[in-house]
Amino acid sequence: MTAAEAEGDERAVEAALRPRSLDEVVGQARVRDQLGLVLEAARMRGRSPDHVLLSGPPGLGKTTLAMIIAHEMTAPLRLTSGPAITHAGDLAAILSGMNEGEVLFVDEIHRMSRPAEEMLYMAMEDFRVDVVIGKGPGATAIPLEIPPFTLVGATTRAGLLPGPLRDRFGFTAHLEYYEPHELDRIVHRSAGLLGVELRPDGSSEIASRSRGTPRIANRLLRRVRDFAQVRADGVVTLDVARAALDLYEVDELGLDRLDRAVLDALCRRFGGGPVGVSTLAVAVGEERETVEEVAEPFLVRNGFLARTPRGRIATRAAWHHLGLAAPAAVADTALFDD
Ligand SMILES: Nc1ncnc2c1ncn2[C@@H]1O[C@H](COP(=O)(O)OP(=O)(O)OP(=O)(O)O)[C@@H](O)[C@H]1O
Ligand SMILES: [Mg+2]
């Protein structure tokens, strides 16, 4: 199997594990309740639901919820993403092809170009866009009606969305990291779908190392399953889960190789900081975005790293976790928590 095939395979498994209806969604009780109400009310009125913004760190269920919204409304779903819309014309082409009641999912909506964003404001509010034909003094704007639709936007960075765009969403759901008992249920559910035999303590071991993230829980489950099949009798017990996760360098707290590399660079190379996130990213050989959106939220949440106006600093817990003695000046996390 080539790397591309393997990745395609992973994506297919991920799709197979996605809950299809709100009832199947584990955790996020508040979001589920609120969204359920929005959808139910829209169904009663026979109208498209209000535009929905889903925000939160990667892997918590934004794409899943977008698909569920369409499914619950028995509406077709169109998928696109901010980076794919480089010109306003790209968006005009999508919008002009929409049918009444359709759900348009724009992933990474914070990465849309400015002109497209402005066109979207109008489309969201008035279900109309102005398509500009030609350039310079001869340019004319042709108004184009769009049938009522529901925009579902997803972003890992709600803070980056301009106010006017944020305000045009009738409902905003912020997804939170999952509790270990919720991840435990997700692991059980996925094991059932994948036909993996799982002991309760094996499952909770996977859940507790999954950084509060369903996608990671599902990925770790698959790696543990590999290990169980090849090195054991196929059953995921506590010992099997532990041995497999150690092999894949996921530690007891769920820190993976990137998380540890970030902390390691921060402490060993930069004396605990403060250091800018770009510098830190270069030091670990990763994109700034990856460090900022994948590693940092988890490290901040667990009190290993703090964001300060002057840069990132390692907390006492970070030094400890690496087995290093913290310099006397290292402050307690609480002072810097943001
Ligand atoms: N509440 C949930 N219950 C059960 N499984 C879930 C839940 N949320 C997410 N998952 C699982 O986690 C996987 C990742 O979810 P999803 O793709 O929706 O995340 P995302 O927020 O869109 O991430 P990204 O920001 O990277 O696009 C899905 O395949 C799904 O199986
Ligand atoms: Mg997604």
Image (tube, helix red, strand yellow):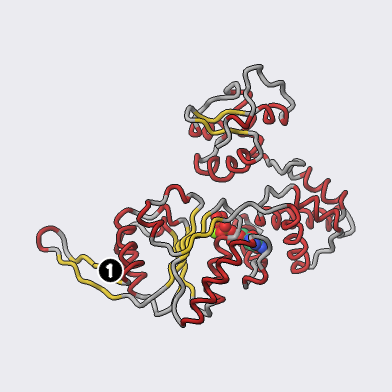
Q: Position of residue 70 (x, y in %)?
A: 52, 74
Amino acid type of the residue that numbered disc 1 sits on in the rendered structure: Val
Indicate the secondary structure of the residue bearing disc 1. Answer: strand
The percent position of residue 198, horizontal first and vertical second, equals: 84, 60
Q: Nearer the viewer, residue 337 or 260?
A: 337
Residue 172 position in % (x across, y down): 49, 60
Q: Nearer the viewer, residue 122 or 45?
A: 45
Residue 47 showing in the rendered view: yes
Q: Residue at x 49, y 73 (%)?
A: 77
Q: Residue 224 vs residue 92: left or right?
A: right
Please identify the quarter of the rendering in which residue 199 is found. Answer: bottom right
Label 1, on which residue? 129
Q: Residue at x 68, y 47 (%)?
A: 211
Q: Residue at x 55, y 69 (%)?
A: 67
Q: Is residue 91 left or right of residue 200?
A: left
Question: Residue 252: x percent and y percent?
Answer: 77, 41
Where does the N terminus fall, quadrant-wise?
Answer: bottom right
Q: How many marks?
A: 1
